[in-house]
Image: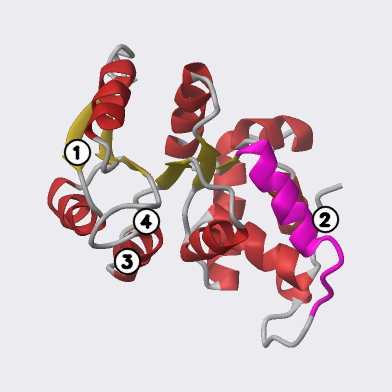
Amino acid sequence: MGNIRILLAEDHVLVRESLRDYLEKDPNLKVIGEASDGEEMVSLAAQLKPDIIIADIAMPKLNGIEATKQIRETNSQVPILILTAYDLDQYIFPLLEAGAAGYLLKDISGQELLDSIYRVSKGDSVLHPTVMRKVMQRFRNTNGGQDSISFDLLTDREVEVLTLAARGKSNKEIAEKLSVSVRTVEAHLGHIFTKLDVGSRTEAIIFALKKGWVGLD
């Protein structure tokens, strides 16, 4: 496996240095840049083109939400993994809707962070259990609402894939469940993104949950 090139965006120097030192103990991970504020995160993302960005929310000049939006506006598909102490709704939902690939809280273990990095780098999304519960509560009783995109646009297999993704299953787990290859799952997800006009797995899940197309139970 080649190196996963990581950009760290964290305003606390000690936290950033500790993260870098821990991550680089894994021979497959390499920190190629460090941003101390949101503006630097956006700039370095464009310059360095990392494989993944790990970012906090509360940063000077530009917070993690706005930085994520700006990176997405440049059509960059780099996965952004949020690692923060905040589990507030006003942070969680704007970030997920902006296309963040994952949202983790800083009470996770080092191994959980490593596992999440590998999952996100393969196209999966990851949510801390506390965040997942908030997502479930927000969308459990949501009905379809008005939208020009119809549920019938998705095939039965695409609905199956999206439902399993919404339940937190990785691409590998979805492939095993449906007795298909991981490449086939990735292809289905690509078709779903195109049909729903979204840029990431997380955005597709949020869209489908809002519409009431899939459930988490």
As for residue 136 lying within the magenta part, the answer is: yes
Disc 4 on helix, strand or loop? Answer: helix
Q: Main secondary structure of the magenta part?
A: helix
Mark 2 lies on residue? 215
Calculate the distance from the C-alpha at mark 3 to the C-alpha at mark 2.
Answer: 29 Å
Mark 4 lies on residue? 64
Q: Badge 2: few (under 14), some or many (20 or more) residues near its Cα, within 10 Å?
A: some
As for residue 206 lying within the magenta part, the answer is: no
Calculate the distance from the C-alpha at mark 3 to the C-alpha at mark 1.
Answer: 22 Å
Q: Badge 3: few (under 14), some or many (20 or more) residues near its Cα, within 10 Å?
A: few
Residue sitting nearer the eye, 123 or 80? 80
Determine whether label 4 and label 2 are within 8 Å by CB.
no
Calculate the distance from the C-alpha at mark 4 to the C-alpha at mark 3.
Answer: 17 Å
What are the residue bounds of the magenta stretch? 128-144
Mark 3 lies on residue? 75
Residue 185 in percent (x, y) is at 62, 44
Residue sitting nearer the eye, 22 or 215? 22
Disc 1 on helix, strand or loop? Answer: strand
Mark 1 lies on residue? 34
Residue visible at 41% across and 61% down in the picture:
65
Determine whether label 4 and label 3 are within 8 Å by CB.
no
